[in-house]
């Protein structure tokens, strides 16, 4: 036995739109439309975030497993990624 097909309203937990809802609706102005598109162009919803500071170089490095485990543990305590923690540690010892 098949049930009723699920609708968008079901997912959102809202009642279906009625004729009265459409009567109260208004068209947006061209200025509102342009403003919306200008605002949306600044959104970045996918991909890596833009880097604020200098460029990073991708490298391959061999690290002893104990050192890597220590870095991951310390990074987790600080709420960082382990690569970020390693980078910050190295920067602190070079400057």
Image (cartoon, rainbow, N blue to C red):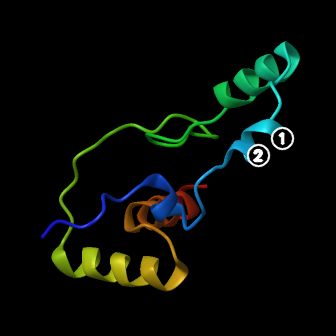
In the figure, 59 relative to 81: above or below?
above
Which label is found at residue 1? Answer: none
> Which residue lies at the image location 79% right of the left edge and 37% below the top edge?
23
Frontmost residue, 7 versus 54: 7
Q: Residue furthest left?
A: 1
In this figure, which residue is indicated by the disc labeled 1? 24
Answer few, some or many: residues within 10 Å of disc 1's Cα (few below 14, many 20 plus, some between 14 and 19): few
CB of mark 2 within 8 Å of CB of mark 1? yes
> Which residue lies at the image location 18% right of the left edge and 72% below the top edge?
64
In this figure, which residue is indicated by the disc labeled 2? 20
Q: Residue furthest front?
A: 19
> Which residue lies at the image location 39% right of the left edge and 68% below the top edge?
82
> Which residue lies at the image location 43% right of the left edge and 67% below the top edge?
81
Frontmost residue, 91 versus 28: 28
Q: Percent from the top left, x then y, of residue 36?
A: 75, 27
Determine which quarter of the picture holds residue 42: top right
Q: Percent from the top left, x then y, of residue 22?
A: 73, 39
């Amino acid at each position: 036995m098949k049930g009723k097909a699920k609708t968008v309203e079901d997912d959102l937990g809202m009642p279906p739109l009625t004729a009265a809802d459409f009567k109260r609706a208004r068209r947006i102005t061209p200025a509102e439309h342009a403003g919306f598109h200008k605002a949306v162009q600044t959104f970045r919803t996918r991909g890596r975030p833009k880097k604020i500071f200098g460029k990073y170089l991708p490298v391959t490095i061999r690290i002893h497993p104990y050192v890597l485990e220590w870095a991951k543990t310390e990074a987790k305590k600080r709420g960082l990624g382990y690569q970020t923690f390693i980078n910050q540690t190295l920067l602190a010892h070079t400057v």
